[in-house]
Image: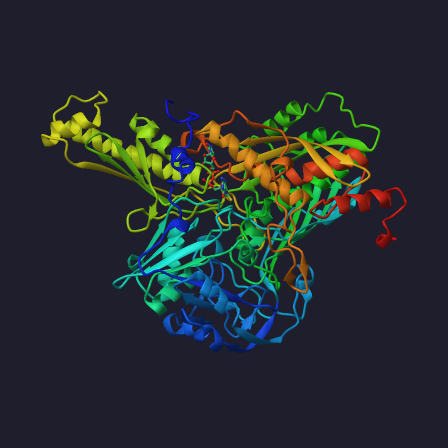
Amino acid sequence: MAQVGRGIPRLEARSKVTGRAEYTHNLRLPGMLYAKVFRSTVPHGRIVRIDTSAAAALPGVERVVTGEDIRKVIPEPYYGPAFHDQPILALDKVRHVGEPVAAVVAADPHVAEQAVQLIEAEYEELPAVYDEVEAMTSQAIVHEVLKPAGTFADLKHLAGKTGTNVALDFHLTRGDTDKAFAGADHVFEHTFRSQQALHLAFEPFVAVAEPGDGMVTVHTSNQTPSFVRMEIARLLGWQENQVRVKVPLLGGGFGAKVYVKLEPLVVALALIVRRPVKVALTMEEQFYMITKHPTTFRIKSGVTKDGKITARECEVHWNGGAYADIGPRVCQKSGFTAPGPYDIDHIKIDSYELYTNRTPCGALRGFGIPQLVWAYECHTDIIARELGIDPVEMRRKNILREGRPQATGTKMKDAAIEQVLDALAEQMPWSKPFDRGTGVIRRGRGIAIGFKASISPTTSVAIVNVSADGSASLNMATTDMGQGSDTIMAQIVAEVLDIQAEHVRVMHTDTDITPYDMGTLGSRSTFHMGHAVRLAAEDAKAKLAALAAEAGLPPGTNYPPSEIFVKRYGMRAGNVIGSGTYIPTYQSPDKTTGMSENVTPFWMIGGTGAEIEVDTETGKVRVTRLVNVADCGTPINPRIATTQLSGGATMALGFTLFEDMVLDGGQVTNASLADYKIPGMHDIPPMYNELVDAKQSNGPFGAKGLGESATFGVSPAIANALDDAVGIRLTDLPMTPEAVLRALRAKEGRPLEDDA
Ligand code: MCN
């Protein structure tokens, strides 16, 4: 292959470094106004009164809008991909601190901000619930009524449970775990918890709505433009062709910008004031938009004395926050992989998505998988160490091999789990002696592996347009948020048409001209859109061949397109337009057993090896080396694919060691980049990245997804290394110096004062 497999630089690299790249933030429209949001200060309460009079009286303020005003243009102003549970601005109740309650529109954003400070709201406070396990039985009910959205095929069965906080519960049973535990040599049970954290794209959420003649245009930083169009049309009761959604490049998305976020608000405001309106969040406001699910995962395994896992029970509580967003899918799709990439005969999974009075939680790079791997890979490591089995051997003994059924019953195919494990062991290198140190600084190493199913079934459509000079453009709605999709899709077009990738122009999403795509999420684009793009290019190629035949050119030769057009039309005129649609096959899990023969079109595999240093006097953990290994089938662009590994691992490193949204009475106390620490250059260790030599037989050119794979194993690999170094086991994230020091001191029998 000439184009697929080329490690070319990103096509947009030059425009990014010269500042010419197009972002929604840079957009200024004639007559455009700015809106700022007034937010709830209580976690759960009935709205008694909102006084907007002082704000409305401030010179320069165009309009102050509340939830009731929105109802005048959108009678049912509730949105969401799973449930229509989220009001554009709060109605009747607020359900988390930071929830949008009112908005001020002004020509000057500073005036709008000043006016927001003048709004007053009074609430009758209601009991609140923040913890996912407490939410199961709490009397504090976040939603009294639930309306399933019914939009996506895989979420059609959603109902919610009135009178509880359960948005979705997923159950899977295979074999008989009770019997297997009774017959096991050893039974181990642990509980692991993970924290609330956030995406923090360096381009915060931003959207602009531009009302037109019987239509509206939305310019937005979003990963799912086709869904935005559908959802805005549904809210307004308009046809989809009256809504135009334009998405340029994104300054990061990481799963935050999926489905609709600011778009309903900005559209409602623009329709009310009949002018273009922009809403651009500050860094701080991102803490109130969407976050990563905190989880509590109780895991129990029955094991033979030589380390074969015979049974596993997984009970996962997902803290979904105040609005479901896409949480139910996280709970189900990730939930069914909770036992890990292991071949276990007896399995029971209970996975619960719960409403609480926190900022909503949704998709974040890994879609719940890192929370699961955190638990099952720590658990697996503890078992290995207690049984005196080498952790790599323990995994090798149990991994799911080709043709064996995963928990759902779907047989594993093209999942290079063993190769990933072998590559990790080799690169660490695991078989060589390791110096653990003797003084204040101790060293340890650990590994972890994880896997993820792709979201299914989903649709992607692409159009390839070949001009008479032979150049080609690609119309698709995949969003390039930094992962390099523009470049690799151009490589796929170029491969089929036998041209250079650099000569393919990739159009950014404009739903008036780019066809439907389910979304840039779940690392689905290379596989799904890659197929659609391949099919579209093949269609164009077949049409070019037909044109050559019409022109009387003898068959069998690959004529340059320009020659074909000239021969056929007498000059460089005309176009050839190829289109392609891709949707994989799928069988939804049985409602009672959770079983399915075809639950995913491909499996993503990722593994991490970590070497760390622990300062036993301060508890500080320094990661000295990370080994990131993944199976992405054929890398379309090995150079960019490798950077996906280091990017994903760096993000996961932050969630492992320091990132944590600290809550006090429902109030986030560290909602700023000064107090919420993300990895800086000095925190990033040397990394070794490897893509194992594998092929996805049903993938475009043998490729499958990769964007999240490096996030899976980082937390447990570091926790396992910590145990290896100093013999302490942390079960909560993040592993801050304070948490490490507390555990060290407790182990030494001299607990820190407030633990004594
Ligand atoms: N790639 C490749 N060959 C493969 C697979 C992938 O060359 N066989 C490379 C390509 O450059 C491709 C990229 O890896 O564009 C990711 O491909 P894929 O795994 O198909 O993921 P998507 O294009 O669907 O992107 C989404 C995925 C997700 S879900 C999140 S979250 C994420 C991510 O990718 N957010 C990112 N990577 C990110 N990278 C950056 N810089 N910024 C984000 O916000």
Q: Nearer the viewer, residue 262 or 411?
A: 262
**Residue 543, position as x, y percentages in the image:** 22, 33
Q: Which quadrant of the view contains residue 412? A: top right
Residue 616 percent across, percent down from the top left: 81, 37
Residue 601 sits above or below residue 97 on the image? above
Q: Indicate the position of residue 521 as horizontal and vertical percent values.
A: 47, 45
Q: Residue at x 61, y 33 (%)?
A: 607
Quarter-wise, where is residue 171 in the image? bottom right
The residue sitting at the front extreme is 59
Location of the N terminus by quadrant is top left
Q: Quadrant of residue 21?
A: top left
Asked whether 322 or 662 is in front, the reply is 662
| Direction right: furthest residue | 749
Reply above or below: 641 against 261: above
439 lies above or below 62: above
| Residue 634 visible in the picture | no
Residue 414 spot, x, y in % from top left: 52, 32
Coloring basis for residues: rainbow
